[in-house]
Image (cartoon, rainbow, N blue to C red):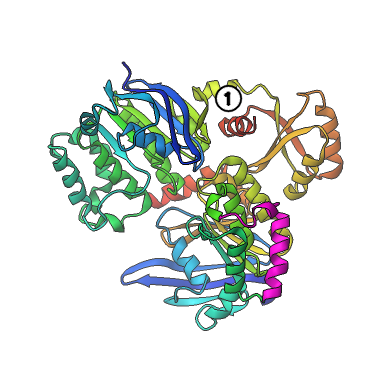
């Protein structure tokens, strides 16, 4: 049995269906990303899998153990980093790590191998209270604390939210190294660009999984031709592009707009002519859509 | 000359004990500009922003916001700016129109001005039907849009947006930027922080703070050229890496 097995899990809070019939599996040594905005149900799912919340229906197994019957064993065997910073703010870096090692009946020394790469980066601040660390440092410490008992399954709930791009990049590099040690990792994120760093992604919206696939598979499944357009005045470009009668979707992506048409490539020429007339400096090129394009398409359909 | 700028700073500095959170920063934000204020966690963005909003007294240097001095005219600053962050949002247990009335009052609008503004705002956001709904029952995207519209309900000269789109879905995030563009088009100066580097591209100019200092300030296109980078994300990574070495 795979380290994480989820079968038809549903959970309702009053009138809100937080999870609707969720099923997926995560293999050993796999980095599985749950990608979705706030309110998609990511945290609810984490809480079910870490035995902190009972699902209404469905079954789930972590490390081959039932999340309802074997909750005590699961709690011992998994690492969990909740979305909200969960460490003791008034304990130092070192004290927090010692504390987590102790409650899991182990020591920092025993599993130092696993955390060394990460811990050396925060070691210079080991006497600093956790509350005084910067966002990126806090996340590294929290990851160390979640790893100190050598878990076989790691649950990371939005570890990079609100973290700057540099710290985010470093954090993902660490996850790649952990994965290579055979740990199954379930990680959630609202940043679409991070989806590309996962082996498998599940796109989540309103309690449902829109698609489970490899990042490449997600992109390949997007059948619509897409163009990136640019012009000197982007504000004007977006309003003229949206006014074109065959425009299906048109959204800003960094320094360009991504546009799809209702009838594939049939109106490509017409669009180019129409846009050129109204927008000085226009450039238009056919592009491969990214994960974010796909997610937006799936959200609307 | 002064009147062309919504924000000016000259050597603005804030020290906490020995720690220099904001170190001698100098920049100007033009009226009607969308100005992206970027930086790593702990780079000093929040400290700088709090000084500009009149919430924190600088240690040294000068700054004016909407023409008012950050040392002596903080109350005038507060009346002439709007502020919105991901965390500081609306009251979930008040209705949409109650929130509008509350903030309208806080920003000093008269009762009749609030009434007019409420009708306009509800129509613009197509929220007429939800006027009596609790804000807590609205989807996050609607809350964000409502929150932004309320932050500019008093027609401020400048609106400060502190990570306004964190955790928001990609479609809503873009609709939110449509609102920002519209406000800027109407002449409101927008001062915005974000961790989404694609959003940095939507700004007219961007500054990047590293260790309390402004390390780069230019249009996104010029920054990409200067740093030989394809995207703003690469520019950011290059600057922040230099700082670590």
Q: Residues within 10 Å of mark 1 (few under 14, many from 20)?
A: some
Tell me the residue at 62%/76% (across/down).
B108
Q: Residue furthest front?
A: A14
Q: Which residue is mark 1?
A: A219
At mark 1, the secondary structure is helix
Please provide percent x and percent y for residue A196.
Answer: 49, 30
* Residue B238 percent location from the top left of the image: 47, 46
**Could you say which quadrant of the image residue A113 lies in?**
top left
Q: Is residue B186 left or right of residue A278?
A: left
Q: Position of residue A295 (x, y in %)?
A: 58, 32
* In-front residue for pair A237/A213: A213
Could you tell me which residue is drawn at 30 percent across and 41 percent down? A143
Q: Is residue B119 magenta?
A: yes
Which quarter of the figure is the N terminus of chain B placed in?
bottom right
Q: Residue furthest bottom?
A: B72
Q: How many marks do you count on the picture?
A: 1
Q: Is residue A77 above or below residue B177?
A: above
B178 up-or-down from A241: above or below = below
Is residue A260 in the magenta section?
no
Residue, x 53% and y 46% (percent of image)? B196
| Residue B192, visible in the rendered structure | yes
Dominant SS of magenta comes to helix
Check the residue under mark 1 and report the chain it is in: A
Q: As rendered, which of A277 and B242 lies closer to the eye?
A: A277
Q: Is residue B182 above or below residue A281?
A: below
Q: Which residues are magenta?
A: B111-134
Q: Position of residue A217 (x, y in %)?
A: 54, 20
A283 displayed left or right of B163: right
């Amino acid at each position: 049995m795979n380290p994480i097995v989820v079968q038809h899990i549903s959970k309702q809070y009053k009138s809100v269906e937080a999870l609707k019939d969720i099923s997926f599996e995560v293999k050993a040594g796999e980095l599985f990303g749950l990608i979705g905005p706030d309110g998609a149900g990511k945290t609810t799912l984490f809480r079910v899998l870490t035995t902190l919340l009972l699902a209404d229906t469905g079954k789930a197994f972590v490390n081959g153990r039932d999340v309802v019957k074997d909750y005590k064993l699961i709690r011992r065997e998994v690492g969990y980093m909740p979305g909200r910073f969960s460490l003791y703010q008034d304990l130092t870096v070192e004290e927090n790590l010692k504390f987590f090692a102790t409650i899991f009946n182990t020591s920092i020394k025993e599993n130092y191998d696993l955390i060394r790469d990460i811990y050396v980066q925060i070691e210079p601040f080991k006497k600093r209270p956790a509350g005084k660390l910067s966002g990126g440092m806090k996340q590294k410490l929290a990851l160390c604390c979640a790893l100190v008992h050598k878990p076989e399954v790691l649950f990371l709930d939005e570890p990079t939210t609100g973290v700057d791009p540099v710290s985010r990049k470093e954090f993902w590099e660490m996850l790649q190294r952990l994965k290579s040690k055979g740990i199954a990792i379930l990680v959630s994120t609202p940043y679409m660009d991070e989806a590309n760093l996962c082996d498998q992604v599940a796109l989540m919206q309103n309690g449902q999984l829109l698609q489970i696939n490899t990042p490449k598979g997600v992109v390949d499944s997007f059948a619509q031709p897409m163009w990136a357009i640019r012009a000197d005045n982007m504000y004007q470009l977006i309003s003229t592009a949206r006014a074109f009668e065959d425009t299906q979707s048109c959204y800003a992506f960094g320094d360009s707009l991504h546009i799809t048409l209702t009838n594939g490539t049939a109106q490509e020429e017409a669009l180019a002519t129409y846009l050129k007339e109204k927008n000085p400096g226009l450039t238009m090129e056919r592009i491969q859509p990214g994960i974010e394009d796909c997610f937006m398409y799936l959200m609307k359909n | 000359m002064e009147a062309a700028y919504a924000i000016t700073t000259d050597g603005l500095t804030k020290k906490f004990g020995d720690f220099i959170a904001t170190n001698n920063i100098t920049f100007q934000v033009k009226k009607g500009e969308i100005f992206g204020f970027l930086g790593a966690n702990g780079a000093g963005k929040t400290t700088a922003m709090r000084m500009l909003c009149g919430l924190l007294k600088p240690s040294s240097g000068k700054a004016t916001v909407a023409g008012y001095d950050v040392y002596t005219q903080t109350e005038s600053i507060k009346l002439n700016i709007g502020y919105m962050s991901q965390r500081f949002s609306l009251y979930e247990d008040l209705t949409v129109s109650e929130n509008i009335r509350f903030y309208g009052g806080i920003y000093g609008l008269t009762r009749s001005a609030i009434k007019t503004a409420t009708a306009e705002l509800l129509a613009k956001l197509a929220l007429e039907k939800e006027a009596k709904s609790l804000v807590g029952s609205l989807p996050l995207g609607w809350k964000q849009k409502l929150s932004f519209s309320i932050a500019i309900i008093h027609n401020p000269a400048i609106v400060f947006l502190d990570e306004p789109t964190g955790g928001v879905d990609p479609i809503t995030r873009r609709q939110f930027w449509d609102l920002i563009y519209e406000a800027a088009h109407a002449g409101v100066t927008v001062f915005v922080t974000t961790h989404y580097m694609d959003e940095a591209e939507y700004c007219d100019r961007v500054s990047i703070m590293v260790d309390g200092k402004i390390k780069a300030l230019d249009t996104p296109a010029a920054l990409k050229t200067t740093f030989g980078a394809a995207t703003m994300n690469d520019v950011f990574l290059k600057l922040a890496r230099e700082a670590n070495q």
